[in-house]
Image (cartoon, helix red, strand yellow):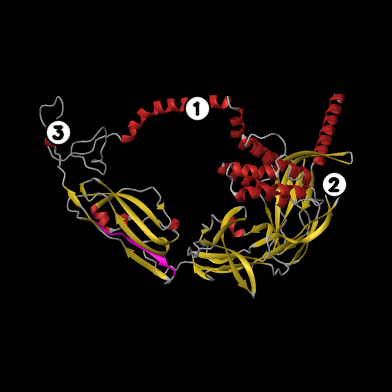
């Protein structure tokens, strides 16, 4: 008995020792892109959780004046790094966090907290210094709104202007309002004029900007301008967050040593920053006083129109009615007018339930409704009233549609005398018949009594299905045989898929050394070009790109972008400074867009 107790105690000790080892294997490490944060800007923090696999919960700090947000889902990573003969292994989750600020000061962050397997782990603390943006005469950002006070669901135009006096090499444009585009039903607003249009990347979205020249405070600037429209959906004070941009511009030259340790003169770059002011707009709720019963949520200025293709029908025939509401406003908030609440409809028509949403176009919404005339005395489809709130007048307005004249033809009333029952000699007596469980009697009338019961013409398409399947299989087999005999064609067709796998591999090295990451990213582009044009396995040069551009009619802009990519990779790869994570993410996105544009043009 004593031996059993000793074994049991020993087992518990071993289990506790194993648990302590597992706990000791979890390590948290943070890397901050910059400890100086400019008001209106955002720095990135990377949290590496070594030994954490999944089902971990990250708790972000709550510090007045700072805002933390997780940038996407955590990614799994596994790597081995050897430095000075010492091997370091990492296997766990990597979190990316954005940090922004609302006021200046020096902040001490006690660390990030991660809960994993019922245990709590905290990273090392770090400091962040928040400063005001330096006045940049060469670059400015101005944000403006069409109104400072407006009603709920009234459109608000936001104009964004970027003023420049230098040629920008690289930029990072942020406008946090774009992250709430679905909530505000954000869309581009029409801009007057015929100025040249350029696409700029803001928060990862390509947005068209008009390019013009403008004088500001006596200085001449190149201005990029765009206008966005939103619909505030909650009453109260609406905050339009500041827009910001970080850019790299040339600032003379400097003497540096190249890869072969030679002194060379190379361009010198500096980073500049501009941020707009945060704006506040008062959103007022719609008044309850004077709100008509027919109000269904429309805010703006609208008209209503009825139409139908059926002006001559029989009693009970379906009449497909189109209710079109057009004008200016947020059409997604407009509900269909309820016809059963209109006395003339309720008296003269059977109104079918309509479960389909309205069809929204740029300047209108259309509802389809089926109605059926009850008797031949009906001479028109009555008008429909639509009420909306006009923010310009500050009151509710009701408009009425047109009516539609119709001709309702009488139908024959079937009586009991018209019914012949097999095997029955005497005719049924009485003229009033009722609905029965199996089938209906002859004079049964209901909404669908006169609906055609013939097959829809679409059923005949089933006869075409077998030959279409045969032809599709035949073409596919012949195409596959042709591909098997043409290795160059196979390589060309597979170029896009291979580039996606190479790009995925480059993304996995985003935290590795700069030279390793950039070399892999360079191979993504050169490998795609080699596969697409069936070239050799050597590195693609700028001369190769020029020749391919002429031979395959690649646009001048795209060939210039390709050359810039390779030049950018070489400049960063052979420089001594490390490439920040934010810049690496931007380079990956730019390479992906270039490959998509190449695929589109070829």
Can residue 425 be seen in this snapshot?
yes
Which range is magenta?
A: 381-391
Using the image as rendered, state which of residue 204 and residue 277 is in the foreground. Answer: 204
Residue 313, compared with residue 499, is above or below; it is below
Residue 274 marker: none
Q: Residues within 10 Å of mark 2 (few under 14, many from 20)?
A: few
The residue at 57%/44% (across/down) is: 553
State the residue position of label 3: 419
Query: Any magenta on residue 91?
Result: no
Residue 237, compared with residue 578, is above or below; it is below
How far apart marks 3 and 1 lie (CA) works out to 60 Å
Q: Percent x, y for residue 587?
A: 69, 49
Query: Which quadrant holds the N terminus?
Result: top right
Query: Circle 3 — which element?
Result: loop
How far apart marks 1 and 2 lie (CA) works out to 54 Å
First-in-chain label (2 vs 3): 2
Residue 476 marker: 1
* Location of residue 138 by image quarter: bottom right
Query: Which quadrant holds the C terminus?
Result: top right
Query: Circle 1 — which element?
Result: helix
Q: Percent x, y for residue 151?
A: 48, 67
First-in-chain label (1 vs 2): 2
């Amino acid at each position: 008995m004593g031996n059993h107790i000793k074994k049991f105690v020993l087992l518990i000790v071993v289990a506790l020792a194993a648990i302590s080892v597992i706990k000791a294997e979890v390590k948290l490490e943070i890397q901050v892109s910059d400890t100086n944060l400019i008001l209106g800007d955002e720095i990135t923090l990377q949290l590496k959780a070594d030994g954490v696999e999944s089902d971990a919960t990250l708790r972000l700090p709550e510090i007045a004046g700072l805002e933390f947000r997780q940038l996407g889902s955590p990614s799994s990573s596994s790597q081995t790094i050897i430095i000075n003969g010492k091997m370091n292994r990492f296997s766990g989750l990597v979190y990316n966090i954005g940090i922004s600020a609302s006021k200046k000061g020096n902040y001490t962050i006690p660390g990030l907290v991660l809960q994993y397997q019922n245990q709590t782990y905290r990273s090392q603390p770090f400091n962040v210094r928040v400063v005001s943006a330096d006045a940049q005469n060469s670059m400015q950002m101005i944000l403006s709104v069409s109104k400072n006070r407006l009603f709920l669901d009234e459109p608000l135009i936001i104009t964004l202007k970027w003023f420049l006096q230098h040629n920008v090499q690289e930029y990072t444009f942020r406008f946090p309002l774009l992250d709430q585009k679905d909530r505000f039903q954000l869309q581009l607003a029409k801009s007057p004029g015929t100025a040249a249009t350029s696409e700029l990347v803001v928060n990862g979205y390509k947005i068209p900007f008009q390019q013009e020249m403008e004088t500001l405070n006596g200085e001449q600037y190149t201005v990029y301008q765009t206008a966005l429209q939103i619909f505030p959906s909650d009453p109260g004070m609406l905050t339009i967050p500041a827009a910001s941009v970080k850019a790299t511009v040339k600032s003379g030259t400097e003497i540096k040593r190249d890869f072969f340790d030679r002194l060379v003169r190379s361009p010198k770059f500096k980073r500049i920053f501009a941020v707009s002011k945060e704006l506040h707009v008062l959103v007022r709720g719609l008044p309850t006083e004077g709100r008509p019963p027919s109000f269904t949520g429309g805010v703006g200025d609208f008209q209503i129109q009825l139409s139908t293709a059926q002006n001559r029908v029989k009693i009970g025939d379906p009449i497909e009615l189109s209710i079109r509401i057009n004008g200016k406003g947020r059409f997604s908030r407009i509900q269909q007018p309820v016809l059963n609440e209109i006395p003339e409809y309720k008296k003269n028509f059977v109104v079918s339930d309509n479960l389909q949403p309205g069809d929204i176009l740029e300047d209108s919404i259309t509802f389809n409704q089926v109605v059926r005339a009850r008797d031949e005395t009906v001479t028109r489809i009555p008008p429909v009233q639509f009420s909306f709130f006009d923010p310009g007048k500050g009151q509710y307005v009701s408009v009425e549609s047109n009516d539609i004249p119709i001709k309702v033809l009488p139908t024959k009333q079937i009586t009991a005398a018209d019914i012949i029952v097999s095997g029955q000699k005497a005719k049924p007596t009485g003229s009033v018949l009722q609905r029965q469980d199996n089938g209906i009697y002859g004079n049964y009338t209901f909404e669908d009594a006169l609906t055609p019961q013939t097959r829809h013409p679409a059923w005949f398409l089933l006869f075409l299905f077998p030959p279409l399947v045969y032809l599709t299989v035949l073409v596919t087999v012949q195409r596959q045989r042709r591909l098997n005999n043409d290795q160059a064609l196979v390589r060309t067709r597979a170029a896009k898929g291979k580039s996606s796998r190479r790009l995925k591999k480059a993304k996995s090295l985003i935290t590795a050394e700069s030279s390793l990451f950039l070399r892999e990213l360079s191979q993504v582009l050169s490998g795609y070009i080699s596969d697409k044009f069936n070239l050799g396995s050597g590195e693609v040069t700028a001369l190769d790109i020029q020749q391919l551009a002429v031979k395959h009619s690649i646009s001048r802009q795209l060939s210039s972008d390709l050359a810039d990519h390779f030049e950018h990779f070489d400049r960063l790869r052979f420089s001594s400074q490390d490439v920040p994570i934010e810049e690496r993410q931007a380079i990956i996105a730019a390479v992906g867009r270039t490959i998509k544009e190449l695929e589109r043009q070829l």
